[in-house]
Image (cartoon, rainbow, N blue to C red):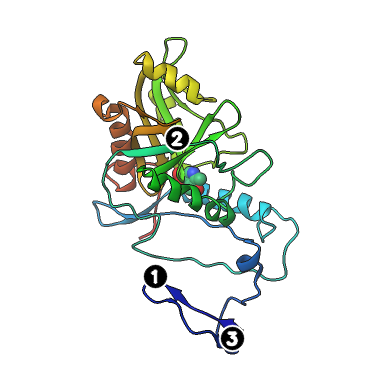
Amino acid sequence: MLTVEWSSEFGWEKPHIKPFQNLSLHPASSVLHYGVELFEGLKAFRGVDNKIRVFRPDLNMERMNRSARRATLPSSLGVKKPSKALLLVILSPVGPYFSSGSFNPVSLWANPKYVRAWEGGTGDCKMGGNYGASLFAQCEAVEHGCQQVLWLYGKDHQITEVGTMNLFLYWINEDGEEELATPPLDGIILPGVTRQSILELARQWGEFRVTERYLTMGQLTAALEENRVKEMFGSGTACVVCPVSDILYKGKVLHIPTMENGPELTSRILSKLTDIQYGREESAWTVVLS
Ligand SMILES: *Cc1c(COP(=O)(O)O)cnc(C)c1O
């Protein structure tokens, strides 16, 4: 096998031809060439009582099964299987699922030239290819001084997800109703555990409309002009919720007044979910490991 290593420090190093040995992953594995891969992300929390808890792991396992089925990898759902597969479980105090714990708002770059997911695609599964394909857009967002990508879809510029998080808009909708809205699971949205938990909590609170509906840039722009936007935030296991402060769209910065509005709802959701995760509040959503 010809091997050439690269690092930012030394660039491409000298090529070597050597046999491959002691690798648990065969260099010809489909995962390396065709991206036949899926992953999951789950955090464990050391609670205030020193017990270790995980948050709704059954939902991650169900999603993993669905992703495996779509990737034709072994799942309990039973479809075509390859002859070999490798399951890696990485226990790590760092990585994408470890958040620094800050609650800083992010700025987003919204440009329809890149598409994260599409009807009939794999955007509703946690398959590696979705993420590898999104890095280029993420780099362009950073070049434009933004932190993350706001993924748009379709001719009407539907707002779908932010970076690798689901998206919520807390606003006064077109009918004058106070509403917490997030796009529906129509195949292009990743069904987040945090998303589902926020929807369930907010519906249980029963204080405002909670809707899974399409949201477009046009609707958002109109709502901003009419002062109807309260808060916008991303949701995911890493950060729980992440406030949005600005969106760069069609060469203009749209300011989202999330932080000016508290952010009341975003903070309330963060407190509620972290109270459960760290065992400050008893909940059937956590499983105690030890
Ligand atoms: C993982 C992920 C999310 C968030 O899912 P959680 O289960 O809440 O962590 C949202 N969008 C994308 C694209 C993701 O990969």
Mark 1 and mark 3 in contact? Answer it, CB < 8 Å: no
Mark nearer the N terminus (1 vs 3):
1
Horizontal side, residue 66 vs residue 280: left or right: right
Question: Is residue 217 visible to the viewer in this orientation of the structure?
Answer: yes
Determine whether the residue tagged by mark 1 lies in a helix, strand or loop. loop
Residue at position x 27%, y 41% in the image? 104
Q: Which mark is residue 45?
A: none
- Spatial separation of the CA atoms under disc 2 and disc 3: 44 Å
Task: Residue under label 2, please give it.
Answer: 167
**Which quadrant is the N terminus positioned in?**
bottom right
Q: Nearer the viewer, mark 1 or mark 2?
A: 1
**Residue on which the image places disc 1:** 8
Q: Disc 1 versus disc 3: distance between alpha carbons? A: 24 Å
53 on left or right of 129: left
Name the residue: 67% across, 61% down.
74
Farthest front residue in view: 251
Residue 80: horizontal and vertical position, in percent? Answer: 75, 59
**Which one is in front, 98 or 29?**
29
Residue 207 in view of the camera: no
- Residue at image position (39%, 47%) is 143
Rendered residue at 29%/42% (across/down): 275
Crowd band around label 2 with a 10 angstrom C-alpha radius: few (<14), some (14–19), many (20+):
many
The label nearer to you, 1 versus 3, is 1
Classify mark 3: residues with Cα within 10 Å, few (<14), some (14-19) or many (20+).
few
Neighbour tally class for label 1: few under 14, some 14-19, many 20 plus, Cα within 10 Å: few
User: Quadrant of the rendered structure where residue 256 is?
Assistant: top left
Give the amino acid at mark 2: Leu
**Residue occupied by mark 3:** 20
Q: Quadrant of residue 190?
A: top right
